[in-house]
Amino acid sequence: MGWEITIDRVQRRRERPKDDDLRFGRVFADHMFLMDYESGRGWHDPRIVPYGPLALPPAAAVLHYAQTIFEGLKAYATEDGRVLLFRPRENARRLNASADRLCMPRVDEDVFLDAIRTLVDLERDWVPSARGTSLYIRPLYFATEEDLSLKPSARYTFAIILSPVGSYYPRGMSPTRIFVEPDDIRSAPGGVGAAKTGGNYARCLRTEARASEAGYDQVLWLDGREKRYIEEVGAMNVFFRLDDKIVTPPLTGTILPGITRDSVLRLCGKWGIEAEERKVELREIAEAAGAGRLREAFGAGTAAVIAPIGWLHCGGDEIEINEGETGDFTEEFYEALTGIQTGRVEDGFGWTEEVPGILK
Ligand code: PLP
Ligand code: COI
């Protein structure tokens, strides 16, 4: 592929909403990145164009068989006006792992990164700067071949869209209420739980809607085989603090290998906090709560950052954690991660990279 991104600029730029008004994923920056794939030809025609609808034939394979994957990462404004990306190569790697699982063509990591850097550079004005805000970057691609036979598509469209965002949960950083789902499952061994693909999210909607109606912020999923072990929350990996130790479910193919999850574990290593990646039985957590050993729980993900869990509803019982308050470890992980992401705290891991000023 000749790698030259063409740019078709909007005639008039829209104004970014005020930082205080930002929710999650409701407004989109002026431009998006697109490129196409055709088997035999590979990825081609990389371009930045005004954000807008895509024309799709009703026979496009994605609309029937859900061959689609996506990623989520963020660009952050520093106090001195630079723009930082957080571990973007990890998103490129995970995108390709999802692509392998869904029989989709890979995207070269450097192509992925170049597309993000160029688009974010063009949209610098869309990076909000108030605390807790960022520019959410959503790369995705999907099957477009017009063929209703069940097979991997021969054509794909890749897009990157940008959305200035505030807090993922409407109540901000306050502790969340989580419903432990006893019946429905999100994924099972041998399935696609570790891939970031739309079907994993669609299948959660019914359960999440029921939990939301009952006053909960998200669902905590149990393993698909025995419904005994904790897996993850709808949009986050989950961590528990038992006494002074951190435990989190292992990556065995049924949960998303979160980049925030990995960052929390690396921070534990640096700070000398004992951390275990292992099967976590729901009963163990309930018993630890009863014995006063469950000191904190939190979710970790790009959109949600670090979200304290104040209450867990399981099997008719309500477990209150840390009296419904954000705990010390949760606060420290949140401060360290957001500090590194926005350049306020020194990045001893090499996690952030500055978006270079490429365009005029
Ligand atoms: N689990 C699920 C199901 C998710 O959608 C996400 C968000 O991307 C995560 C976990 C956290 O992953 P990451 O930290 O890479 O955003
Ligand atoms: C993210 O955190 O980036 C995600 O993709 C989760 C999504 C449900 C908002």
Image: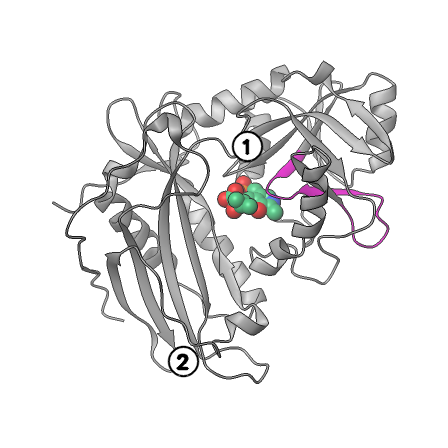
Measure how far apart labels 1 and 2 are at the Cα level.
Answer: 41 Å
Is residue 59 rendered to the left or right of residue 127? right
From the top left corner, tell me how far across and down residue 332 is, in percent: 55, 19
Disc 1 target residue: 169
From the top left corner, tell me how far across and down residue 202 is, in percent: 62, 56
Kindly tell me whether residue 342 is visible in this rendering.
no
Q: Secondary structure at mark 1?
A: loop
Q: Amino acid at mark 1?
A: Tyr
Position of the N terminus by quadrant: bottom left
In magenta segment, residue 100: no
Q: Quadrant of residue 214?
A: top right
The magenta segment is 222-238
Disc 2 target residue: 39
Q: Residue at x 40, y 30 (%)?
A: 341
Kindly tell me whether residue 26 is visible in this rendering.
yes
Is the residue under label 2 in contact with that under label 1 (CB below 8 Å)?
no
Q: Residue furthest front?
A: 213
Q: Residue at x 50, y 70 (%)?
A: 104
Q: Secondary structure at mark 2?
A: loop
Q: Is residue 275 above or below residue 110?
A: above
Looking at the image, tell me whether mark 1 or mark 2 is earlier in sequence order.
2
Q: Amino acid at mark 2?
A: Ser
Q: How many marks?
A: 2
Q: Residues within 10 Å of mark 1 (few under 14, many from 20)?
A: some
